[in-house]
Image: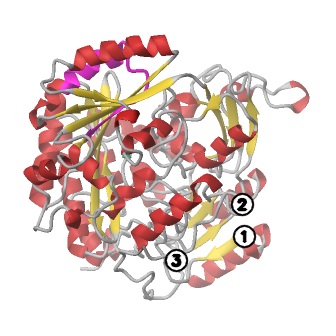
Amino acid sequence: MSSSFPPPPTLATAHSGLPERLVDLGTESKTRLLSKRTLPESVPRQGELPVLPPDTTRAEFNQAIGELQQILGTEHVDINDKPLVDGWYVEHPNTHDAFHIALQDDLVSSAVVYPGTVEEVQAIVRWANKHKIPIYPISMGRNIGYGGTAPRVPGSVVLDLGRRMNRILNVDAENASCLVEPGVSYFALYEEIQRRGLPLWIDTPDVGGGSVLGNAIDRGVGYTPYGDHFANHCGLEIVLPNGELLRTGMGALPGREGADNPTWQSFQPAYGPYADGIFSQSNFGIVVCMGMWLMPEVGHQSYVITFPREEDFPDIVEIIRPLAQQRVLGNIPQLRHAIQELATTAKPKSDFYTGPGPIPRDVIQQHAATLPLGAVSWVFYGTQYGDAASIATQLDIIRKAFSAIPGAKMLFPEDLPADHYLHSRVHVCSGVPVLRELDWLNWVPNAAHLFFSPIVPTRGKDAQVVHDIVVRLHAKYGFDLIPTLCVAGREMHYIVNIVYDRSSLDEKRRAAACMREMIAEAAAEGFGEYRTHILFADMVASTYSWGDNALMRFNETIKDALDPNGILAPGRNGIWPRRFRGKGWEILGSEVEDAIAGRGIGPKSERKA
Ligand code: EUG
C-alpha cells in the first residue's frame, strides 16, 4: 500500500481528530480510500468568489463581513474563495458537501466563522438579522450522507460551532450524565471518560467522529441500550434567532446563587410544554450546549445470526418484533444483507464483479461462500446485556426464536477471524467509537453516499412492501442495494446506502432519480423518512402532508414567529421562512435532477434553462 498520505490529526491537535489508539488504522483507511481516487483533489472554481448570500450585493457583503471580523477577530472568519477540497472523513471540509450530489460548488457558503463563546454566537445572530444574511450552524459537520457541512441556501455564512466550542462542561459520575458543547465528538467524550476511569458508556453511531450534540438534535441512532440519542438527551441551551438565550427542561429554573440547576441533567420535560422537540431537526434555534445520559457499564455479548435464504426476510422481521417489544433485544440491533459482508472487507466491488450494473445475487452468494459467514443472505448483528447468567438465558430465548428460520445459525466473535466486522460491532455495541464502517466507501472509486431512510413497521408484510420498492428501483437505476435495518419493536429504520462515484454526473443523476422515486413510492404506501439529505428535504417534508399540510403550516408559524427575518438555516428540513416562501426555492420532483445537471439550486427564476 502506498504511504503517500499523511496521518490524520489526533485529538491532541484538533477537536475533530482521531484518538491516538486509531491513528494507524485511520492512516491505513485514508490511504486505502484516497489511493483509488481518480478525481483531482480540487478543481478551479468558476465565477466571482465568494458566492454571495441572496439579495446581497458584493459591496454590502464586504461591508457586513468587515463588521463580523470586528466582532470575532479576522482569524475567526474564513472567506470561502479558495479551491474546494473534499478531503477525507477526519479531515473533512466545512466549505461544501464533500459527498456532493449536485455540482461540488452548488451547496457552498460565502464564509465560515468560528464563534468561541455563547455571547459570540448571540452577536453573530444579531449581525445576521441586521444584514439579513442567512447563517447555517453546524456542530462538526459530520452529517455525512445527509449534507455534511453544506448550507441549503448558497452563500449562507456557516457557523462552525465545534472548532472553538468543544468543551466537556461536566461529567457527573453519580447521575451518569454529561454536559457538552457542539464540538465534542464521540471519540473525544469516550477518551475523556476513560481518562477519568469512570465505569460509564457513551453511545456511538457506526462511525465515531460525529458531534454528540449534533447527532442527537438530528435524531441520530446508536447501538447500546441508549441508542435513541434524542431520547437520551437531557437539557438544552439554545441561542434563538433573535439572539436571546434559552434553557429548556429543569435548566429553566435557576440553581442556587446562579449555579446550573442541579436536576438539569436528571429530568427531561420539567414543567409546561416540552420545548426540546422543536429544536431537533429544525431551524428554530442554535443549540450551544446539551446534557446527555450515559449508561453504567455492564456485561455484554455480541453475536451474529445468519440466514441463508433471501426470501425469509419478512419471517425474520416477524421473529424480531416480539423479541424487541419484550426487550429481550435491549438495544438497536442491525439486520444487514450479505453484500455488506463483501463491502466491509474494504475491497472494491471490482474484486467481486466487473460486469455492468448491480452485482447479481448469485455472484454475491458465490463470494460470500468464501468468507467467514458462508453463503448467507441476511445477517443479524445483535448484542445482549447483563451478567453472564442473564445473557445465557437471553441467548437461549433468541436462538430458539430464530431457529424457526431454516438454516439460521448463531456465531460469536471467537468463531470468526480477528478482521471480521463482528469484532467492530462488539465495540460499537458497548460504546467504543470506531472507524470501521467507512470501509464500504472503497466499493466504487471516488465513492460518496446518500442515505434513503424510511421508517418501516416491524412487521413482515409492511417491511416487504418497502423492500420490494427499494429492490425494484435500485435495479431500475443500476445501483447495488446496500440495506442496513436498525430494528426496534415497533419500527425499523430501513437505511439504504446508495454508494455512487461522485466523479460521474450520470451516476449522480441516477442516484437522485432513484432517491426521488423511492421517496414518492414509499410515501404512496404510507411510509416516510426519518431524516434526509438537504437536497431532498423539501421532497421528504412535502410527503408529511396530512390535513392540507397542517404540520408544515404549523412549522412555518413557529418559524416566522421566532425568526421573522428568516436568517437561521432557511430551507433546513424543508422549513422555509416567510421571506423565502413562494419564490421557488423548494426543490421538488425532478428539479433535483435538474440541479445535478448544473442548473443550480437557487430560486427557480435564477436557475439556468
Ligand atoms: C446508518 C444508520 C442510520 C443513518 C444512516 C446510516 C447506518 C449505516 C439509523 O440511522 O441515518 C451503516
Task: Tell me the residue that label 3 is attached to.
Answer: 52
Point out the stretch of residues depicted in magenta: 316-336
Which kind of residue does numbered mark 3 sit on?
Answer: Leu
Look at the image and tell me in which quarter the N terminus lies. Answer: bottom left
Task: Tell me the residue that label 1 is attached to.
Answer: 76
Answer yes or no: is residue 584 visible.
Answer: no
Q: Residues within 10 Å of mark 2 (few under 14, many from 20)?
A: many
The reply to whether the C-beta atoms of the residues labelled 1 and 2 are less than 8 Å apart is yes
Location of residue 71 by image quarter: bottom right
Near-viewer residue (374 or 80): 374
**Mark positioned earlier in the residue sequence (3 or 1):** 3
Task: Tell me the residue that label 2 is attached to.
Answer: 115
Measure how far apart labels 1 and 2 are at the Cα level: 7 Å
Measure how far apart labels 2 and 3 are at the Cα level: 21 Å
Location of residue 114 by image quarter: bottom right
Q: Residues within 10 Å of mark 3 (few under 14, many from 20)?
A: many
Near-viewer residue (438 or 351): 351
Secondary structure at badge 3 equals: loop
The spot of residue 594 in percent (x, y) is: 24, 70
Which kind of residue does numbered mark 1 sit on?
Answer: His
